Amino acid sequence: MKVFLDTGDVKEVEKAAEWGLLDGVTTNPSLIAKSGRRFRETVLEICGLVPEGAISAEVVATDYEGVLKEAHEIASWNPQIVVKVPLIPEGVRAIRTLSQEGIRTNCTLVFSLPQALLAAKAGAAFISNFVGRVDDVGGDGMEAVADTVDMIEQYSFNSEVLVASVRHPKHVVEALQVGAHICTMPFKVMNQLFNHPLTDAGLKRFLDDWNEAGLEIFEKARV
C-alpha cells in the first residue's frame, strides 16, 4: 500500500520525506488555507520535496468550464501533480474530459460505492474514499472502501482506491486489511505508526544492558 501525507504544511512534508516513506502528498483548500501560504508556491515546494511522488492539488470551481480551466492551470505546474476534483455532476464530467486529455485526477469527497463507481467510470486515477467523516456520524467508513476495492478488482477499472479522512492508526491497519491501494494520513497519524510500548521498553533494555557492560562500537586503539 502506498503511503501519502495529507497536509498543506511544507515542514511536515519535509520531515516525512526524510524518513524515506512518502509515495505522495494530498492537499485540499482547507489545508492550503491553514498553511497561510500561496497555493502555487506551496504545491511546487511539496513537489520538490517528494520528487517522485504524486501530489494532489484541488480545484475550487464547481462548474464544468471552471473546473477544466483550473485543472489545466494546476496540471501545467508540474507533471507530478494530480488534480483533485469533487464528486459532483460537473466534477465527474470534467474528470472524464481530463482523463481523455491524459491529465490524472483524484476524485475527492467520495463516501459510497455508487459514488466510487461514477468516479471509476469517469476515469479518475485516484478515488478518495473518506472514512473518518463517515465514522463521525455513526457509520462505517471502511465498508465503502472495501466495497470499492472489490469493485475495482472485479471490473478491472484503472483507478486506485485512496483512503482519506484518516483519524488514527487503526484506520491505516483497516486500509491494509481491505486491500486499499493508497492511504493518506495527517502527519500526527504517520508519526504514531512508529509507536509501540514494547518497542520503547525493548530499546531501553538494550541500551541499559549495553551501557552497563561498558561496550563501545568505536573502540579506542589499544596501545
Image (tube, rainbow, N blue to C red):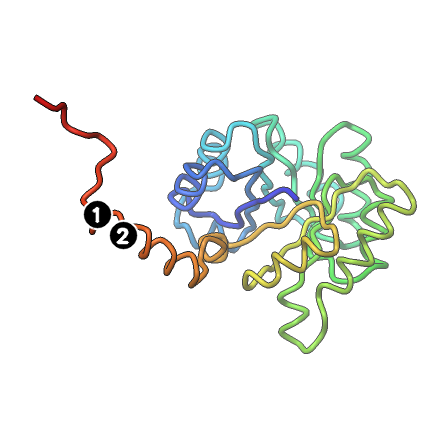
Q: Nearer the viewer, residue 133 or 185?
A: 185
Q: Which residue is mark 2?
A: 209
Q: Quadrant of residue 97?
A: top right
Drawn side of residue 1 relative to residue 197, left or right:
right
Mark 1, secondary structure of its residue: helix
> Between marks 1 and 2, how big is the CA–CA gap?
6 Å
Amino acid residing under circle 1: Ala
Q: Residues within 10 Å of mark 2 (few under 14, many from 20)?
A: few
Up the image or down, 150 lies above or below 47; here it is below
Up the image or down, 223 lies above or below 194; here it is above
Residue drawn at (60%, 59%), measured in percent from left and top?
165
Tag 1 and tag 2, C-beta contact below 8 Å: yes
Amino acid residing under circle 2: Asp
Find residue 213 and name its label. 1
Position of the C terminus by quadrant: top left
Q: Residues within 10 Å of mark 1 (few under 14, many from 20)?
A: few
Residue 220 point in image, percent of width and height: 14, 27
Q: Nearer the viewer, residue 83 or 138?
A: 138
Q: Quadrant of residue 59?
A: top right
